[in-house]
Image (cartoon, rainbow, N blue to C red):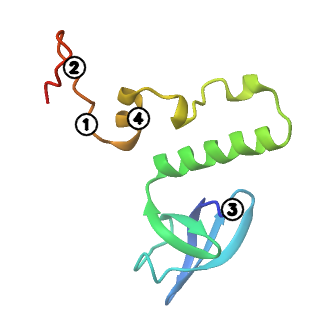
Amino acid sequence: MCLGVAMQVLSVTPGRAIVAGRGRTQPVETALVGEVAPGDWLLVFLDSARERIDAARAAEVDATLDLLEQALGGGHADAAAGFVLPSAMDAGQLAALTGGASPTPPSADGADTR
């Protein structure tokens, strides 16, 4: 399994950056995201930046990884009380999560109103 980690750019050289996140500092390739600058946030997979993200998205990724660490470490379910798997969401929640349009409910006679 490959997990993306949100990391912040500390310094840049052509095609590479030194980034920090989740308690470590490391070099990463930046060819897939173009030019970066110190302070930028990147989503890093296997020593390669795959996506430029904003600080809010970086915080979401970090919070999700914290929940995963708690679950793998045998933490209490209460720690993840606000976390819901997509498979447990209704169509409206999934649409909000993915940025899609909410489904149109069927009419009273059961006909699809789309």
Task: Check disc 4 and report the residue beneath it.
Answer: 94
The residues bearing labels 3 and 2 have C-alpha atoms spaced at a distance of: 39 Å
Q: Secondary structure at mark 1?
A: loop
Of the residues tagged 3 and 2, which is closer to the observer? 2
Q: What is the quadrant of the N terminus in the image?
A: bottom right
Q: Quadrant of the C terminus?
A: top left
Q: Which residue is mark 3?
A: 1
Q: Earlier in the sequence, mark 4 or mark 2?
A: 4
Q: Earlier in the sequence, mark 3 or mark 4?
A: 3
Q: Residue at x 65, y 65 (%)?
A: 20
Residue 46 picture quarter: bottom right
Residue in front for this viewpoint, 91 or 37? 91
Disc 4 and disc 2: Cα gap in Å? 18 Å
Residue nearest the observer in this picture, 53 or 102: 102
Q: Is residue 104 above or below residue 38?
A: above
Taking 51 as reference, is 60 left or right?
right
The amino acid at mark 1 is Ala
Residue 69 location, x and y as percent?
Answer: 76, 45
Mark 3 packing: few (<14 Cα in 10 Å), some, or many (20+)? Answer: few
Residue behind mark 1? 101
Residue drawn at x 83%, y 33% as measured from the top left? 75
Disc sitting over residue 106 in the figure: 2
Q: Identify the mark nearer the N-term, 4 or 1.
A: 4
Helix, strand or loop at mark 2: loop
